[in-house]
Amino acid sequence: MSATHRVVRPSWTCGVDGLPWPCTEAQRSLRNNDPAMLRQLMANLMAIAQRELDDTDPATLYRRFLAWTLEPDQRCAICGSRRHAVIPGVPPRLVPCDGLRVALAADDLPG
């Protein structure tokens, strides 16, 4: 019987191997979920982790929590990158897309 690779908070490490969670084994287990549901779950967990790991770079958190959940052919609707995508429920500040940041900054300028 193998141990379940669960998160230990507030460090967000794996309780089995001590690696940053979700570790490879946790990801493997989580992939059994519906892909859209998995992305929503991981987006919610990333937002919680961002508050608890306040010194962690948002792009690092995105790669850790969401990048691995993307479909192989999924691309960012803003810049076309395959390394990230805008996912419903993920605050734009947590999406590592320079194109999105530029678009948001342009919208913030007074008309």
Image (spheres, grey):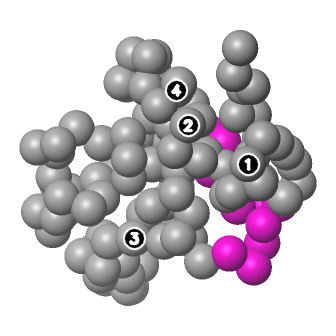
State if disc 3 and disc 4 touch (CB < 8 Å).
no
Q: Which residue is pictured at 73% across the width and 48% down the height?
A: 17
Residue at the spot of label 1: 17
Q: Indicate the secondary structure of the residue bearing disc 2.
A: helix
Looking at the image, tell me whether mark 4 or mark 3 is earlier in sequence order.
4
Looking at the image, tell me whether mark 2 or mark 3 is earlier in sequence order.
2
Q: Indicate the secondary structure of the residue bearing disc 3.
A: loop
Residue at the spot of label 2: 25
Q: Indicate the secondary structure of the residue bearing disc 4.
A: helix
Q: Which label lies toward us, 3 or 1?
A: 1
Looking at the image, tell me whether mark 4 or mark 1 is earlier in sequence order.
1
Image quadrant in which you'd find residue 83: bottom left
Image quadrant in which you'd find residue 79: bottom left
State if disc 1 and disc 4 touch (CB < 8 Å).
no
Q: CA distance from mark 2 to mark 3?
A: 25 Å
Extreme residue toward the right, this view: 10
Q: Which label lies toward us, 4 or 3?
A: 4
Front residue of 86/49: it is 49
Front residue of 89/32: it is 32
Front residue of 71/98: it is 71
Q: CA distance from mark 1 to mark 2?
A: 9 Å
* Kind of residue sitting beneath label 4: Leu
Vertical comparison of 62 with 70: above or below: below
Residue 38 spot, x, y in % from top left? 47, 27
Mark 3: few, some, or many residues within 10 Å (few <14, many ≥20)? many
Q: Which residue is pictured at 30% across the width and 79% down the height?
A: 98
